[in-house]
């Protein structure tokens, strides 16, 4: 019996699940289907999970800097039974939210005062009960729970447990690391360069990073990332917010605008950037059939040309 399609249990603003089909096409065009997929800024892991489910990649390497998010994924992969049991027993209330505050002060997942499972449950709890899934934010409905939307409105236990099980079925194909993304990539340069690998980078965004992430980037961090990754020869793809500073940092690389649904403060379609050191086609959007068919024709032509170029070099 085949494994269920893995679905991330975590909520993330600007989630990248919509990119999976697009990236699968890029992998196919560049003869990278079946590669190991590195995701050094893990977050919700929606892209690599979708690609694993589609069979577009053979395995994934994950890196996460936030100790609560790391601990959650560690529990999903290595203790799914304990995690699901704890979720069943968890009271979704403002009292639990207050009690879990101490976990937000933990800066290292190897903390002696609490287990990875405890940290992982807290990470999931805050992600599912906080505004827009932001671990450092306040609870849905406010601390007085005076809104028509209560703290438990995004916490469907049965669905979350089902999603955890769907991911844990792929645990043998996933390698998980805790730490800084740039440090990890720098230390792993030889391994990544020598193997059949692809690196997908989704760093904290330039404009909204401070609002969305506990471990956000200042300008120098973005500069450090650009200086490092643009010097690498292995295939990589970055997703960023559409900001002039980012365009400056990656002026020598291929940049493709893309529109994604983005749901912090208002539902809207936001322009973002895809940046790569390999050819990337314009994405296809779900619009009218006529427009969509026209776009698909253009993209298919570009992908076919890319494949011919790649084959010519093999």
Image (spheres, grey):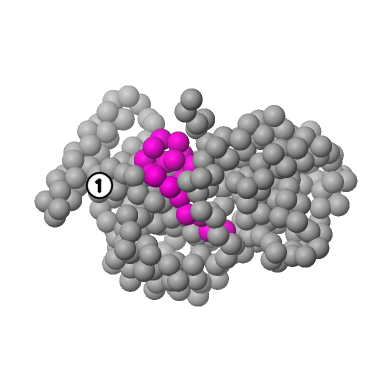
Residue displayed at 22% across by 42% down: 303
Secondary structure found at label 1: loop
Q: Using a 10 Å C-alpha cutoff, classify the residue at mark 1 as few (fewer than 14 neighbours), some (14 to 19) or many (20 or more).
A: some
Question: Is 161 included in the stretch rendered in magenta?
Answer: no
Q: Is residue 69 left or right of residue 105?
A: left
Q: Is residue 8 left or right of residue 87?
A: left
Q: How many marks?
A: 1
Q: Position of residue 311 (x, y in %)?
A: 15, 48
Q: Is residue 294 left or right of residue 17?
A: left
Instruction: State the residue lying farthest toward the left.
Output: 312
Q: Is residue 200 left or right of residue 310?
A: right
Asked if residue 111 shows in the view, the reply is: yes
**Pointer 1: what residue?**
31
Height in image: 78 above or below 206? above
Q: Position of residue 64 (x, y in %)?
A: 57, 58
Residue displayed at 57% across by 35% down: 166
Q: Position of residue 65 (x, y in %)?
A: 59, 62
Q: Nearer the viewer, residue 305 or 58?
A: 58
Q: Quadrant of residue 7?
A: top right
Q: Nearer the viewer, residue 257 or 80?
A: 80
Residue displayed at 31% across by 41% down: 25
Height in image: 53 above or below 282? above
Question: Is 63 included in the stretch rendered in magenta?
Answer: yes
Q: Quadrant of residue 301?
A: top left
Q: Quadrant of residue 305?
A: top left
Asked if residue 248 shows in the view, the reply is: no
Q: Nearer the viewer, residue 56 or 210?
A: 56
In magenta, the rendered stretch is 48-64
Residue displayed at 63% across by 45% down: 76
Height in image: 93 above or below 183? above
Q: Position of residue 294 (x, y in %)?
A: 25, 31
């Amino acid at each position: 019996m085949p494994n269920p399609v893995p679905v991330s249990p975590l909520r993330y603003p600007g989630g990248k699940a919509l990119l999976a089909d697009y990236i699968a096409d890029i992998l196919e065009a560049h003869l990278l289907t079946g590669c190991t997929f590195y995701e050094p800024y893990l977050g919700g892991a929606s892209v690599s999970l979708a690609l694993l489910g589609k069979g577009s990649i053979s395995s994934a390497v994950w890196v996460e800097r936030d100790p609560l998010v790391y601990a959650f994924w560690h529990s999903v992969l290595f203790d799914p039974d304990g995690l699901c049991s704890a979720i069943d027993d968890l009271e979704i209330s403002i009292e639990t939210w207050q009690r879990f505050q101490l976990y937000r002060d933990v800066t290292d997942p190897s903390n002696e005062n609490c287990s990875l499972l405890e940290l992982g449950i807290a990470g999931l709890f805050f992600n599912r009960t906080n505004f827009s899934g932001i671990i450092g934010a306040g609870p849905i409905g406010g601390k007085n729970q005076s809104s028509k939307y209560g703290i438990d409105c995004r916490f469907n236990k049965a669905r979350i447990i089902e999603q955890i099980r769907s991911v844990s079925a792929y645990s043998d194909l996933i390698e998980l690391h805790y730490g800084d993304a740039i440090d990890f990539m720098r230390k792993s340069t030889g391994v990544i360069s020598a193997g059949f690998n692809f690196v997908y980078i989704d760093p904290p965004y330039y404009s909204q990073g401070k609002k969305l992430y506990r471990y956000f980037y200042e300008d120098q961090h973005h500069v450090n990332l650009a200086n490092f990754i643009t010097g690498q020869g292995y295939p990589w793809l970055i997703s960023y917010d559409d900001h002039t500073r980012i365009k400056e940092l990656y002026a020598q690389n291929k940049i493709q605008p893309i529109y994604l649904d983005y749901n912090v403060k208002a539902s809207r379609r936001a322009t973002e950037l895809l940046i790569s050191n390999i050819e990337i086609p314009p994405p296809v959007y779900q619009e009218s059939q006529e427009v969509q068919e026209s776009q698909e024709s253009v993209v298919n032509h570009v992908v076919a040309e890319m494949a011919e170029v790649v084959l010519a070099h093999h």
